[in-house]
């Protein structure tokens, strides 16, 4: 004989009661009336011919049968939700263009892989450039999204995370830390790192010379690892070839910077909306963890 089919709605009510501890709280979570929640629990017990719960004042205690069913219910609901999300995700189609500075590309491989897994029918194009230029492209509707360093003269965007800026030198070799300091900095206009570094040094009364410039860390790294200059990076940009300098270096403290997600000034497409949500979810880091 074929086994009866369990009602997932009743199982979801059971889980809500277990999670909240009472019919009243479960009703609030599910947007039901209390009587509806009680009735659904009774229907589930009648369907299984089992006593699943006992009252302890206003709270509910599950019997051993109720605890067993609860374990099954969580797995069934998880599989149902996973199936629903998967089938809905595969209906998302279209093209999407994201802009990022080259130095932030290392933050996103897992995001890109997961996004492609969820939405294989979406054509994702990634363009690298300076934060300033990428923001301009978003405003001109040439990009759907851009993940950039938040600009002081054009804040905007949705802040995804904040990171401390650090002075760093080569792991095995470093320049003298006396004035004038030898710096490897981003090209003017490439990012706010250069502006922040120069302001901090000026406020501290230090002198410096720019020994090397580039629009990306890939261009700055060789001279830094060779011990010829100091560079400014975020903590997430540190590599095994770089060593951050602490307060004992005598260099001034640097502020936090913000990574912001900019969206084109029109209603976002479904692919853009979902990628934006995924970037926020995957990149958000509590500041105490930095």
Image: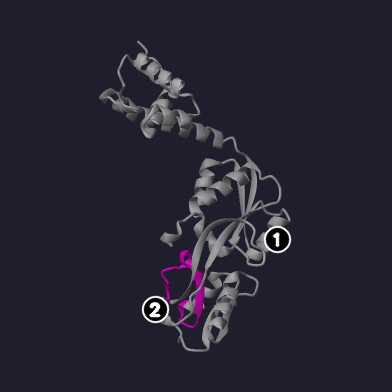
Secondary structure under tag 1 reads: helix
Task: Please state the horizontal and vertical placement of residue 203, each as a whole percent of the image.
Answer: 55, 81
Q: Quadrant of the N terminus?
A: top left
Which residue appears farthest toward the front when viewing the image? 57
> Which residue is at the front of the view, 272 or 154?
154
Secondary structure under tag 2 reads: loop
User: Magenta region: which residues?
Assistant: 225-246
> Which residue is at the front of the view, 70 or 129?
70
Tag 1 near tag 2, CB within 8 Å: no
Q: Quadrant of the C terminus?
A: bottom left
Mark 1–mark 2 Cα distance, whole angstroms, equals: 39 Å
Residue 78 drawn above or below residue 141: above
Residue 277 drawn above or below residue 149: above
Task: Please state the horizontal and vertical placement of residue 17, each as a whole percent of the image.
Answer: 38, 29
Task: Locate residue 210: give its quadrant.
Answer: bottom right
Q: Residue at x 54, y 78 (%)?
A: 200
Task: Locate residue 122: give its quadrant.
Answer: top right
Which residue position is annotated with label 1? 136
Which residue position is annotated with label 2? 172
Task: Please state the horizontal and vertical placement of residue 61, each as a whole percent of the image.
Answer: 30, 27
Confirm whether the magenta stretch covers residue 137. Answer: no
Q: Residue at x 43, y 73 (%)?
A: 244
Mark 1 crowdedness (10 Å alpha carbons): few <14, some 14-19, many ≥20: some
Residue 7 drawn above or below residue 147: above
Task: Please state the horizontal and vertical placement of residue 118, each as a whole percent of the image.
Answer: 52, 41
Q: Which residue is drawn at 64% across and 48% down?
A: 96
């Amino acid at each position: 004989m074929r086994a009866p089919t369990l009602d997932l709605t009743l199982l979801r009510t059971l889980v809500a009661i277990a999670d909240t501890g009472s019919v009243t709280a479960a009703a609030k979570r599910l947007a039901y009336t209390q009587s509806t929640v009680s009735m659904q629990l009774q229907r589930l017990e009648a369907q299984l011919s089992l006593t699943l719960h006992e009252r302890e004042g206003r709270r509910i205690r599950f019997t051993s049968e109720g605890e067993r069913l609860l374990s099954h219910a969580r797995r069934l609901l998880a599989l149902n939700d996973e199936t629903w999300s998967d089938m809905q995700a595969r209906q998302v189609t279209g093209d999407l263009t994201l802009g990022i500075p080259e130095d932030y590309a290392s933050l996103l491989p897992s995001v890109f892989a997961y996004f492609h897994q969820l939405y294989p029918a979406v054509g994702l194009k990634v363009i690298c450039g300076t934060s300033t230029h990428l923001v301009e492209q978003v405003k001109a509707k040439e990009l759907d999204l851009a993940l950039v360093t938040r600009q002081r003269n054009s804040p905007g965007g949705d802040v995804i995370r904040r990171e401390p800026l650090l002075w760093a030198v080569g792991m095995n070799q470093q320049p003298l830390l006396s004035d004038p300091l030898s710096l490897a900095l981003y090209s003017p206009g490439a990012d706010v790192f250069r502006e922040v570094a120069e302001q901090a040094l000026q406020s501290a009364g230090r002198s410096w010379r720019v020994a090397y410039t580039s629009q990306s860390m890939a261009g700055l790294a060789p001279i830094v690892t060779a011990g010829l200059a100091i560079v400014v990076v975020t903590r997430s940009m540190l590599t095994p070839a770089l060593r951050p300098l602490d307060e004992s270096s005598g260099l001034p403290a640097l502020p936090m910077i913000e990574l912001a997600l900019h969206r084109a000034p029109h209603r976002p497409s479904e692919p853009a909306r979902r990628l934006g949500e995924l970037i926020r979810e995957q990149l958000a880091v509590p500041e105490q963890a930095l």
